[in-house]
Amino acid sequence: GQQVMQIPQYQHVQEGEDFTTYCNSSTTLSNIQWYKQRPGGHPVFLIQLVKSGEVKKQKRLTFQFGEAKKNSSLHITATQTTDVGTYFCAGCSGSARQLTFGSGTQLTVLP
Amino acid sequence: NAGVTQTPKFQVLKTGQSMTLQCAQDMNHEYMSWYRQDPGMGLRLIHYSVGAGITDQGEVPNGYNVSRSTTEDFPLRLLSAAPSQTSVYFCASSYSPENSPLHFGNGTRLTVT
């Protein structure tokens, strides 16, 4: 079945440093979504990428979808303490009408 | 707007007991799903439904049953609870898993002793 791998599992950064999490799928994806889960909370949708090579920005967050539609990344510039949480990618491929989540990257931002 | 409502928030069960986790959404979403979240394992799909009367298994369906008699409700039943089912459970809904965001409930923290 479809597998979505996400690295790193944990990342500690000093406030102001940049952060990147990577997502790789074993199959070609029709789309990829990114979610953020604050500690003790539930996942909240951030963005969806659909097109090959697509790049989208939300303030300090940059999302990329690979040319082959099998990988994606989320980059945060100049992290802030409000960025703390776990970031998940989730992909949907082919006829599978279900999202498969990566294992998430837990981001800690040290003040 | 209530969104996705899950009950209860917390539950403690003894091994062998059964219970139902409730999930309701008021957004007229066709797609609903149940995930469990365990440390280091991300969100794993238990069961999902693409519409009333239609359900299917996800990645980890064993020990769980679902039904979808209405568009709004998608309860998850634990038939005979086991310690391995200790987890946080999330219900989620969307118009379509292929191209619209999932809306999550606040989760149910289940402990099986």
Image (tube, coloured by chain):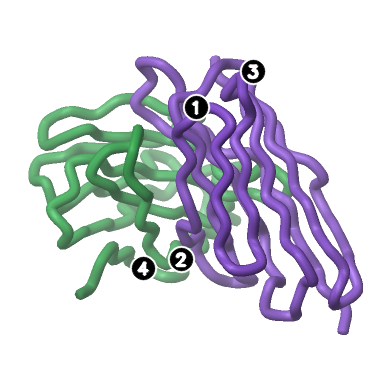
Chain colours: A purple, B green
Question: Quick one: SS at disc 3?
Answer: loop
- The answer to which of B80 and B62 lies nearer the viewer is B62
Question: Quick one: SS at disc 4?
Answer: loop
**Chain under numbered label 1:** B
Residue most extreme to the bottom: A111
**Chain under numbered label 2:** B
Q: Residue at x 42, y 67 (%)?
A: B106
The residue where tag 2 is placed is: B11
Is disc 4 on the same chain as disc 2? yes
In which quadrant of the rendered view does residue B96 lie?
Answer: top left
Is disc 1 in contact with disc 4, using a CB cutoff of under 8 Å?
no
Distance Cα–Cα, label 1 vs label 4: 24 Å
The residue where tag 4 is placed is: B8
Vertical relation: B18 (above or below) A90: below
The residue where tag 1 is placed is: B59
**Chain under numbered label 3:** A
Distance Cα–Cα, label 2 vs label 1: 23 Å
In which quadrant of the rendered view does residue B47 lie?
Answer: top left
**Chain under numbered label 4:** B
Q: A9 left or right of B42?
A: right
